[in-house]
């Protein structure tokens, strides 16, 4: 059984028409408050289970609790993949073949992923002085750790509760920096998440741990031979493309992956959809891009909401395991 795990996508494009609503997954011990789908999915998806995951996370006893941090996907999917790999190693289980994983604007490492200073500064949203304060007094990860423990230092409070909001202004959304002020209910959009996940729900009860660094886990998944795509809506400052690119480059270096394609634009409907680069291992007769980094131009934290057409092009390539569309050679 070929199974792919994606984040965010598909439900918008094909799954609802192809997939059937399911009331519970095998072994799922409770009734969930969100919809789940199963079915053949898009042409090359194989069989998958689709789950809508709102602003909730599974608690240890299997019930859903509110997720205080709007970052489920990047956080849980690598853990889920790891559990799948472990599950497959158990004797006398029918293995669930995981083919590839795509993660959009994922929180993979608190110390890297959430640092927004450079991004906001380069977009003119904070001043030189504030960037300096973030470098010397308090950065995003320090602030988020304090926030999680509800213990604010004077420095962090000054930088992130006063200076940054004053400069950025209240009409700008961090998850979509260039979005014009929207009169409609933004909450609805920002809270809505969709993931496609494997049918191993009972395996994913893991305590949320803010300090978890998922990069080693992602490295392990790649070393198992499972390709990973890291894509990034380039208007998101919460988990910005610069930080995800840093993680991709570090992974490629640490895993000694070679550059498969130069850093180039990819296309959607004759427009530049974003930029991408892939890394991999070249073996005789077969070359597999194990790591693909993609930006989505003009997209926000949740790519399909702001950029459905680019998202579809991106996911077509992902599902078929083929490179993103390039411009025609002139
Ligand atoms: C789930 O809901 C169904 C239908 O409402 C009910 O029959 C079943 O007992 C519930 N299961 C659990 C574990 O609560
Ligand atoms: C399960 O855990 C959640 C959160 O820790 C708690 O609110 C809920 O009451 C627990 N439910 C049961 C049945 O123990
Ligand atoms: C963020 O701040 C912490 C604590 O001061 C520091 O250890 C860490 O290196 C900083 N991270 C970055 C990326 O500057
Ligand atoms: C942050 O600022 C707001 C008002 O600007 C204030 O009400 C709140 O208490 C501050 N938070 C902390 C942790 O000091």
Image: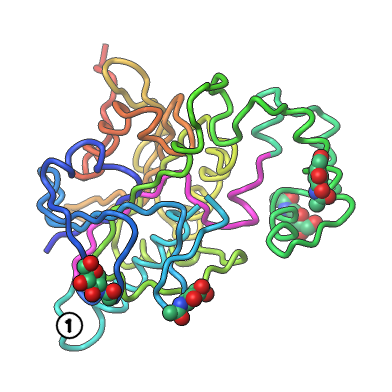
Q: Secondary structure at mark 1?
A: loop
Observer-nearest of 227 and 189: 189
Q: Residue at x 40, y 54 (%)?
A: 257
Q: Residue at x 57, y 39 (%)?
A: 242
Which residue bears the numbered disc 1? 93
From the viewer's perspective, tell me whether residue 301 is left or right of residue 169. Answer: left
Instruction: Quadrant for residue 293, please give it.
Output: top left
Residue 27: percent from left, percent from top: 23, 77
Residue 328: percent from left, percent from top: 24, 17
Observer-nearest of 264 and 197: 197
Under 8 Å from ligand 1: the CB of mark 1? no
Q: Residue at x 82, y 57 (%)?
A: 152
Residue 211 on the magenta span: no
Q: Can see residue 28?
A: no
Observer-nearest of 225 and 269: 269
Q: Can see residue 93?
A: yes
Residue 194: percent from left, percent from top: 34, 48
In the picture shown, does residue 73 fall above or below 91?
Answer: above
Q: Residue at x 17, y 54 (%)?
A: 21
In the picture shown, does residue 244 fall above or below 96?
Answer: above
Residue 107 on the magenta span: yes
Crowd rating for badge 1 (residues with CA inside 10 Å; few <14, some 14–19, many 20+): few
Q: Which residues are magenta?
A: 96-116
Residue 197: percent from left, percent from top: 28, 59
């Amino acid at each position: 059984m070929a199974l792919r795990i994606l984040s965010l996508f598909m439900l918008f494009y094909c799954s609802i028409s192809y997939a059937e609503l399911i009331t519970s997954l095998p072994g799922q011990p409770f009734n969930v408050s969100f919809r789940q789908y199963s079915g053949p999915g898009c042409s090359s998806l194989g069989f998958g289970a689709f789950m809508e995951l709102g602003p909730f996370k599974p608690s240890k006893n299997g019930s859903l609790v509110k997720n205080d941090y709007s970052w489920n996907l990047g956080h849980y999917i690598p853990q889920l993949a790891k559990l799948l790999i472990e599950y497959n190693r158990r004797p006398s289980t029918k293995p669930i073949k995981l083919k590839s994983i795509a993660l959009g604007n994922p929180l993979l490492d608190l110390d890297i992923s959430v640092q927004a200073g450079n991004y906001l500064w380069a977009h003119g949203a904070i001043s030189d002085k504030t960037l300096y304060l973030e470098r010397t007094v308090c950065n995003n990860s320090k602030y988020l750790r304090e926030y999680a423990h509800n213990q604010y230092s004077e420095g962090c409070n000054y930088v992130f509760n006063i200076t940054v909001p004053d400069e950025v202004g209240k009409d700008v959304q961090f998850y979509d920096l260039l979005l014009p002020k929207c009169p409609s209910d933004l909450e609805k959009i920002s809270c809505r998440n969709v993931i496609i996940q494997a049918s191993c729900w009972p395996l994913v009860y893991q305590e949320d741990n803010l300090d978890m660094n998922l990069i080693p886990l992602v490295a392990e998944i790649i070393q198992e031979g499972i390709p990973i795509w890291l894509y990034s809506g380039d208007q998101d400052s919460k988990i910005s493309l610069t930080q995800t690119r840093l993680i991709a480059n570090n992974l490629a270096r640490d895993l000694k992956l070679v550059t498969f394609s130069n850093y180039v634009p990819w296309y959607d409907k004759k427009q530049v959809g974003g930029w991408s680069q892939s890394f991999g291992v070249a073996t005789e007769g077969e070359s597999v891009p194990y790591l693909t980094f993609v930006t989505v131009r003009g997209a926000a934290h949740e790519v399909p909401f702001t950029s459905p057409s680019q998202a579809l092009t991106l996911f077509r390539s992902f599902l078929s395991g083929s490179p993103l569309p390039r411009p025609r050679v002139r």
